[in-house]
Image (tube, rainbow, N blue to C red):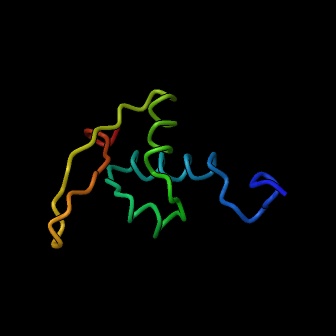
């Protein structure tokens, strides 16, 4: 059995569509947001896919209370 045989794994195309819609609504997203909202554990791969599809996704760093820096992805002006 391969990972492709496991029908319970989220489909990356579906995750791409959900993340695209979220960003197009003017929202930003972090890896933790992607896990919590969409079950996506590879946000950077989804961002790569969406950029390949023509979205101009920007990234900035945010410090969290622990002192760690996390990537925050967004579209300028929601588009």
User: At 28% from the left edge and 51% from the top edge, which residue is drawn?
Assistant: 71
Whole-percent x, y for residue 61 in the image: 20, 50
Q: Is residue 71 above or below residue 37?
A: above
User: At 26% from the left edge and 56% from the top edge, which residue is drawn?
Assistant: 70
User: At 78% from the left edge and 61% from the top edge, which residue is drawn?
Assistant: 6
Between residue 10 and residue 23, name the one nearer to us: 10
What is the number of callouts on the image?
0
Q: Report the quarter where the C terminus lies.
A: top left
Q: Residue furthest front?
A: 1
Between residue 79 and residue 53, name the one nearer to us: 53
Whole-percent x, y for residue 35 in the image: 47, 65
Whole-percent x, y for residue 74 in the image: 31, 45
Left/right placement of residue 9 relative to residue 41 reads right
Residue 32, image quadrant:
bottom left
User: At 50% from the left edge and 59% from the top edge, which residue is drawn?
Assistant: 41
Left/right placement of residue 36 relative to residue 27 reads right
Left/right placement of residue 55 relative to residue 72 reads right
Whole-percent x, y for residue 30 in the image: 34, 57
Left/right placement of residue 77 relative to residue 51 reads left
Q: Report the quarter where the N terminus lies.
A: bottom right
């Amino acid at each position: 059995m391969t990972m492709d045989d496991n029908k319970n794994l989220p489909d990356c195309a579906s995750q791409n569509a959900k993340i695209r819609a979220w960003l197009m609504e003017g929202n930003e997203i972090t890896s933790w947001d992607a896990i919590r909202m969409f079950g996506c554990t590879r946000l950077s791969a989804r961002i790569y896919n969406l950029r390949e599809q023509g979205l101009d996704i920007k990234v900035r760093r945010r410090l969290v209370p622990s002192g760690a820096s996390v990537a925050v992805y967004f579209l300028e002006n929601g588009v």
